[in-house]
Image (cartoon, rainbow, N blue to C red):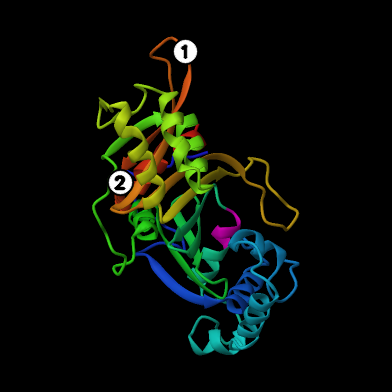
Amino acid sequence: MPTVDLSSPTPPPDSLLAGLPRRISLTLPELRLVAERAGGAPLPFLAPAAEAGRSAGLESRLGPSRGAGDDAAYAAALAGLHEPIESLTRRGLLDAWGEPDPGLAGAVGLLATPRVAVDLDLNITGAQLHAWHRHGRTAVATLATADGLVFELGWFATAQWPAELARVAALPAELPRQTSALPGVLDLPYELLDASGEAVRSGRADVVPVLAGHHSGRVVADGVVLPDAQVPGLLGALQRESRGRLRALVADLPEAPDTSGTTPSLDTVGVTSWLLLADGWHALRPHVDTTDGRQEGRVEVRRVEPADLATSLAPVLAEVSR
């Protein structure tokens, strides 16, 4: 397994995926057709044998069913899309013999046969985005959608991956940004974070001071132990400000090749999670503290920027390269 380095430039790739990032919008029927013409390449979210319409595979990756009415609307929208052969040919993505553009076919092929996989799920004030990044020897192919109807397919050299990860985490320009009540770095016991969050969500904010009292002197803000009286307000602000999340799951492929013709099974290596608060993204980093001679599960909540996503993923990707 090659080392995945998101910090150092790599030599220009010499494959069909060479060159600057290229992005193409494809409808679901177009994407299915390209995958079929590219040797039946399995897509990362959809089994090849899925029926027309919103399949179980797509459903499991894009979220649970929202009811019969929404499913009917989705089916109607899918049925109203252009015929894929005609639309792809008109756009120059299929040649006269019905073969897909070489770069397009190479990108779909890399989606099906990666060395490393990163699945990203975003929820920002109720809007969802799902992206699949697949790394090969010298290149990365990506697929992203917000509605399960229209997908963005992209491919680029590995050296450009950090910028593309930052693009996924970029916040909409119209999203208001405010000053957060949280410090730049908050470090607290996981048990306190979990229990206080559940209390606030269930309408029992009155028990948060009691929970905080059980962890006296264990909450640290910007490297300074926070006075116990300030902890309940900070925990409440953490829950009130929350308006989105980002989750990145990193996995690698088993070394044994999969000849079944289905989507390869991925071995999960780790998960990176961010929270969207009033002032932007905050990364969650679980860790274990043994300062007092006992093990305590803790969580660091650190303010980050979209460009920091590659850095956040680097330790997890390092596990893949071992």
**Residue 300: quarter of image:** top left
Q: Which residues are magenta?
A: 109-113
The vertical placement of 65 against 115, above or below, is: below
Which residue is at the far front?
206
Residue 253 painted magenta: no
User: Mark 2 belongs to which amino acid?
Assistant: Val
Q: Is residue 189 at least partly visible in the picture?
A: no
Residue at the spot of label 2: 304
Report x, y in % for residue 88.
Answer: 54, 84
The vertical placement of 5 against 155, above or below, is: above
Name the residue: 66% across, 66% down: 65
Query: Is the Cβ of the residue at disc 1 closer than 8 Å to that at disc 2?
Result: no
Closer to the N terminus: mark 1 or mark 2? 1
Crowding around mark 2 (Cα neighbors within 10 Å: few <14, some 14 to 19, many 20+) is: some
Report x, y in % for residue 237.
Answer: 35, 46
User: Mark 1 belongs to which amino acid?
Assistant: Arg
Q: CA distance from mark 1 to mark 2?
A: 30 Å
Name the residue: 60% across, 84% down: 77
> Between tags 1 and 2, which lies in front?
1
Label number found at residue 24:
none
Report x, y in % for residue 67.
Answer: 68, 71
Residue at the spot of label 1: 294
Report x, y in % for residue 322.
Answer: 50, 31
